[in-house]
């Protein structure tokens, strides 16, 4: 029993020594942060268009089917493929007898919302010009993005780590030291601020925003930033 106790104590001592050695593998380190940021012109603009049935003088109600056909035809004429157009919402209120009773109407007006992705402000202006003012209940830009997102993310992460290394060099030189190997590198934290729109705009409102020279309204740039923390060995 005594022999076993001594053996266990020796094993514990060896484990403790190894743990201390691992802990003190890099006894002298420097911890720095690096940042990289970029502003990008968006090339993906997501627009939502809300359409609604309406009464046309002398013709009665213009059906949602006709409004849909006219809208999709207009979008197609701009060269926007079907894959960039999707239904965001559809409400055929006519089928709800409770709502008809509540509003005391024989029928209500159906609505449909489309999401359309355009590539720039020029294409957006062309879409606005083709909208039916009577059928268009609401029009707004949901968000903007860039098709190069993954490529830019990778580049900025690398730039952030390089910035951390540069900082480690001049900080260590201030005390006559040099940075060695990287002990730890944390995954860079992303600060992504896409330009989110919460405005409602009619054709006339957008037209009033255009510059006097007739050039298209430019979109606010997307800002991307990465911060990374790196621990370097001091030599």
Image (cartoon, grey):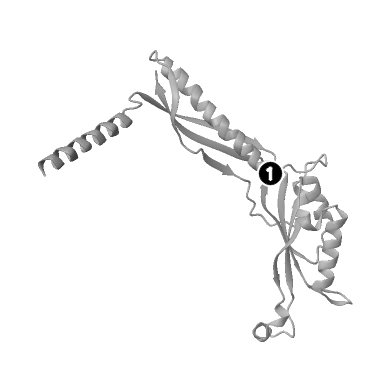
- Number of numbered markers: 1
Q: Is residue 27 above or below residue 64?
A: above
| Residue 38: x %, y % from top left | 61, 34
User: If the image is split into quadrants, where does the N terminus sit?
Assistant: top left
* Between 8 and 102, the one nearer to me in the picture: 8
Residue drawn 85% across the image and 65% down it: 70
* Between 63 and 24, the one nearer to me in the picture: 24
| Residue 137: x %, y % from top left | 74, 65
* Residue 130 lies in quadrant: bottom right
Residue lying farthest top?
176
| Residue 74: x %, y % from top left | 85, 59
Residue drawn 74% across the image and 85% down it: 106
Q: Secondary structure at mark 1?
A: loop
* Residue that numbered label 1 is attached to: 146
* Between 171 and 194, the one nearer to me in the picture: 171
Residue 165 in the figure: left or right of residue 96: left
Residue 230 in the figure: left or right of residue 36: left
Residue 29 in the figure: left or right of residue 153: left
Residue lying farthest left?
2
User: If the image is split into quadrants, where does the C terminus sit?
Assistant: top left
Q: Is residue 129 above or below residue 30?
A: below
| Residue 176: x %, y % from top left | 39, 12
């Amino acid at each position: 029993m005594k022999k076993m106790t001594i053996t266990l104590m020796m094993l514990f001592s060896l484990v403790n020594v190894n743990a201390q050695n691992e802990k003190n593998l890099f006894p002298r380190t420097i911890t720095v942060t690096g940042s990289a940021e970029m502003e990008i012109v968006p090339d993906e603009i997501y627009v939502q268009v809300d359409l609604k049935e309406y009464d046309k003088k002398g013709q009665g109600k213009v059906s949602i089917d006709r409004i849909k056909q006219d809208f999709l035809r207009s979008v197609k004429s701009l060269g926007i493929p079907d894959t960039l157009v999707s239904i965001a919402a559809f409400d055929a209120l006519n089928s709800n007898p409770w709502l008809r009773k509540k509003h005391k109407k024989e029928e209500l007006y159906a609505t449909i919302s489309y999401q359309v992705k355009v590539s720039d402000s020029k294409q957006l202006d062309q879409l606005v010009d083709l909208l039916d003012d009577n059928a268009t209940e609401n029009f707004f830009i949901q968000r903007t993005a860039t098709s190069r997102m993954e490529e830019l993310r990778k580049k900025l992460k690398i730039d952030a780590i390089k910035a951390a290394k540069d900082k480690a060099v001049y900080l260590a030189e201030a005390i006559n030291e040099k940075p060695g190997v990287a002990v730890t590198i944390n995954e860079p934290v992303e600060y992504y601020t896409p330009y989110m729109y919460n405005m409602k705009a009619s054709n006339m409102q957008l037209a009033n925003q255009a510059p006097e020279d007739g050039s298209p309204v430019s979109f606010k740039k997307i800002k991307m930033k990465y911060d990374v923390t790196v621990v370097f060995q001091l030599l």
